Image (cartoon, helix red, strand yellow):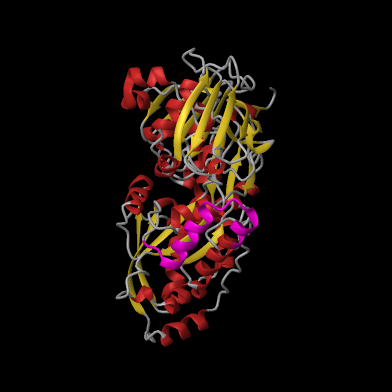
Amino acid sequence: MKRTLGLGALAVVVSLLVRMPAPLAAPPEGQVTWAVPVTLPASWFDPAEATGILIPFMVYYALHDALVKPMPADQMSPSLAESWSASPDGLVYDFVLRKGVRFHNGELVTADDVKFSLERYRGVSAKAFKDRVRQVQVVDPHHVRIQLKEPWPDFLTFYATPATGAAWIVPRKYVEKVGDDGFKKAPVGAGPYRFVSFTPGVELVLEAHDQYWRKKPSVKRLVFKVVPDEVTRVAMLKRGEIDIAYVLRGPIAEEVRRTAGLTLKPVHFYGEQWVLFTDQWDPKSLWADRRVRLAVNHAIDREAMNQSFTLGFSRMTGSIIPRDFEFAWPTPPHSYDPRKAKQLLTEAGYPHGFDAGELWTDTGFADQTEAIANYLAAVGIRTRVRALERAAYFTQVREKKLRPLVYLASAAYGNAATRIDSFVAAGGLYAYGSYPDLEGLVREQAGERDRRRREATLHRIQQLMHERAMFAPIWNIAALHAYGPRVAEPAFGLVGNYLFSAPYEEIRLKGQ
């Protein structure tokens, strides 16, 4: 397991690293450099493989473009499609493409590329599209028609937001020429920046696509450096080696706030995080007892974690579904009550607690997972935190290998139904089990076109999730990003509820 520093140790290291004198590096003119906390795999260059998490969109928004996507004006903004319409029966969607738009290799974007990209899509919701889409028709080079087998109320939610990567368009001729592996080595898109170079584990370099249809980017070159350690990210920011540092916490974020020339910016997004009880469906498991799951919920001091890790900017929640999602039920958070947690454990037959085994997490969530483990230990639930690198972590979660406790997170767009589809419904990519009555309600709402009836059903699902303590929701976490003195516009928060800088063509350096 990769260990991370506790907040106290971080404060000492921050003081040593961030305060130490160092000359500012001479930044390249016309370049903005990010320090990102995760490794950038080549699979993130291909939107067909979108995994249902938001992080790959950090790359998609630069390299690629979608028919429709969240932008500053709207959560579903016309992009490669200048307009779209749906038939009254909800079975046909027509998209009219913007004329004259070209991929980075000079090829025109056509309806043929749209058809190819949707049929090629194999990401998190590929089965949902395969089960529901009857056919994709090229009406003419600038008109594509998608016919459904039956009404699908969430079609646009799945297609026109970062709930999936299905509407992000790649060039058919180029992909067929170089193959999937060749595309990942030298991706070609229609976004504001084109691919220059990629050094795995080190950096991704992109250059402005001056013919981008929306506007010519202000910044000539973007560089994304992989810097997993947040203390190092801040030290690099202070020395001028980078311009933007993603995801800072606790005393490190506080240090940035006190440093002249640096700016700390909290960003709110669809960032729910929670603990999953993977064995609750096994009648032989102690986790099948609701009282044990409820005890975990009452054992965690979420507000103390909020103040410690995110300086009080995160929002408390009682659900895995963002409060701003369509059809979200306002779920009340469980109170911090360790006495009640111990009482519940006693009633369940564990007056002295128990050894719970592994609590699995992503290395990026290790600090908050350690804090949760400490709160659980205080009421008698003993765990061993196991942290995995992000790619291995999500692979093993999808393969249902991590048990009995998993710290999970999602910042994907969508609505209450899409989040339920991934994490609650039978067959969901990250669901370890389901309940028959919940499954019936999931099926009931899936084809319901009456909004009020559908909302009532989705609210009932969320109420049952809460009553059964299926999860231990922690918070809607705020991301604390920082930027240096060269940056005039980091593009944080321009796209509503989006975690990273976007759109990239809006980023500006001072003096531009």
In the depicted structure, whether residue 445 falls above or below residue 98: below
Asked whether residue 151 appears in the rendered view, the answer is yes
Left-right relation of 427 to 139: left
Name the residue nearer the viewer: 503 or 321.
321
Tell me if residue 103 comes above or below residue 376 in the rendering: above
Determine if residue 206 is in view.
no
Left or right, 193 with respect to 427, comes to right
| Residues rendered magenta in the picture | 433-456
x then y, percent, for residue 442: 48, 58
Picture coordinates of residue 392, whole percent (x, y): 33, 47
Residue that appears at 68% across and 27% down: 510
Quarter-of-image position of residue 485: top right
The reply to whether the magenta stretch includes residue 437 is: yes
Q: Quadrant of residue 403?
A: bottom left
Name the residue at 50% across, 46% down.
17
Our reading of the magenta stretch's main secondary structure is helix
Nearer the observer, 141 or 27: 141
Q: Was residue 242 drawn as part of the magenta stretch in this picture?
A: no
Q: Residue at x 50, y 62 (%)?
A: 441
Count of picture labels: 0
Report x, y in % for residue 197: 41, 23
Residue at the extreme top: 106
Looking at the rendering, in which quadrant would you find the C terminus?
top right
